[in-house]
Amino acid sequence: MPRKKAGNKQGKQEPQKKRNKRFQSVRGMRDILPKEQPYWQKLRKVVEKIAIDYAYGRIDFPVLEDKELFERGTGKNTDIVDKEMYKFKTKGGANVCLRPEGTPSVVRAYLQHGMASQRKPVKLSYSGPMYRYDRPQEGRYREFFQFGFEAIGEQDAILDAQMIQMATRIFKSLKIKNVALHLNSIGCEECRPSYNNLLISYLNNRKKSLCMDCKKRLNKNPLRVLDCKEEKCTQVVGQAPQTVDHLCGDCKTHFTSLLEYLDEIQIVYSLRPQLVRGLDYYTKTVFEFFTEDDEGAQSALGGGGRYDNLVGMLGGRETPGVGFACGMDRLVKAMKDNETEPYLLPIPKVYLAQLGDSAKKKSLRIFEELNKAGVMIAESFGRGNLRTQLRQANKINAEIVLIIGQREALDDSVILKDMNSGGQETMPAEKIVKEVKKRLKKNAVLAKRIAKQKAEKEKKELSKKKKAAKRKSKKK
Ligand code: HAM
């Protein structure tokens, strides 16, 4: 019996349309296409090298976490948790969320896996997607990527300085210029309460001039008012008491030594009394790295600080910690703005062409053999036309073209065409790996010699030009 087709009277358009719907990525989330990847590859390589150099072990943790981890860690009243977290109930009734940042997850893993018994500091690095339901705009996404470094178990300010040094080295390696380091100390549980009281009373006297959000923040989280970007609030905050003037002895010493360490390694910083960062766990040091794009728009490339109470807040024994994280999407943009050379993928120097069905079968094996021997090969297996394939070989500037036709497939041989000399010869398939490797090596030696000769010639010409210019200026 013929199946009844669904649809309306006007030509059964609707179901067809629905079936053909083109999907788009979800708002605020995007695909990172192959042409973008060389920048990401370069960034990942630089970060991995820093992790090795400074002895940070890699950690990966789930994208989905217990919602309460961030409510307690990052802070219930922060924008990240209060407004921007993707949270939901699982079928089993668990309250989970997509991780909005990495620090609480690292501390959870540190406690869960008994890392507290390891030699301190425990140094961990990570990278991956984070999720914040914020208003998307240039450089701000709902799914974005971060890499981060956390050192747990050491309170000496030398670690804070080393974190800043690591970030600075990453920016330098990526050739990102004009990165400003903003720095502040926001005290600890010893000195913060009296400072908060001072700030609250200052702000209460000017409450009318604050934005709606800050009026609410005032009593719950007064430090955040300092960070508000609303013009009317920045005016009020300009004259507010500063955290650095109200630090306890311990925090003051800590901050002074951090500044001394930074001076020692010649890292330029700018003290920012209004910098508090939007996360609740910070104590003492807070810092942020800013850059400006061509249009003058400021963007935070990364930020971090000390969190001496976080391990305790998440159920562990009081243990100090410090770390930072950078936005990888923003770093990739900054790399492009600074014309940083991306990671260059190696280009194959050998092209494998085939003609006819049996040759095609053979070429699959030859490809594998050469590849296993470490020779990169290009091919267009889907194409049968030899001219098209040779054109492709020319396009990638192949040094060697291997051709397998009907006859070669029959007697198990391969035609080797040397594109430099133009000569070609047929040889048994079993010898091809050795021969290709030999020729590539010879070509590489030759190319090196030519490059050296060229560089020497250029050097001579330059010095000739300089001498001529000197003579000319002497005559004058
Ligand atoms: P954060 O300042 O919230 O700190 O984020 C670090 C960096 O992630 C920002 O400076 C920015 O480059 C990038 N970022 C944040 N939100 C977005 C977004 N919506 N789109 C694109 N990039 C974004 C933290 O996450 C802390 N866990 C840092 C830390 C580690 N503190 C101590 N250890």
Image (tube, grey):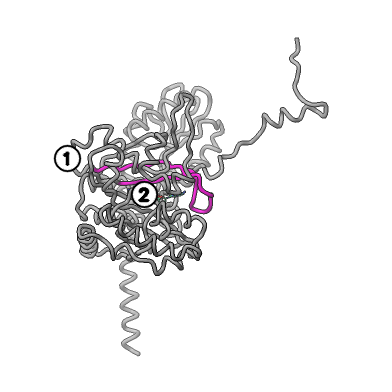
Q: Which residue is at the front of the view, 143 or 274?
A: 274
Q: In the rendered picture of this protein, how many numbered marks are placed on residues?
A: 2
For the N terminus, which image quadrant? top right
> Residue at coordinates 42% horizontally, 34% vertically from top-left?
64
Q: Nearer the viewer, residue 361 or 249?
A: 249
The label number, if any, that marks residue 119 in the structure image = 1
Q: Position of residue 7 (x, y in %)?
A: 76, 25
* Disc 2/disc 1 C-alpha distance (Å): 27 Å
Q: Is 156 above or below relative to 439?
A: below
| Number of the front mark, 2 or 1 | 2
Q: Residues within 10 Å of mark 1 (few under 14, many from 20)?
A: few
Determine if residue 271 is in view: yes
Name the disc covering residue 46, or none: none
Q: Which residue is mark 2?
A: 280
Residue 334 position, x and y percent, is 43, 56
> Is 387 displayed left or right of 22 in the figure?
left
> x, y percentage for residue 419?
43, 43
309 versus 373 height, above or below: below
Neighbours of disc 2 within 10 Å: few (<14), some (14-19), many (20+): many
Badge 1 marks a residue whose secondary structure is loop
Can the viewer see residue 421 in this picture? no
Range drawn in magenta: 123-149
Q: Quadrant of residue 196?
A: bottom left
- Residue positioned 66% across, 34% down in the render: 21
Q: Residue furthest bottom?
A: 476
At label 2, the amino acid type is Asp
Q: Residue at position x 46%, y 29% from top?
A: 404
Spot occupied by residue 130 in the image (x, y as percentages of width and height): 43, 42
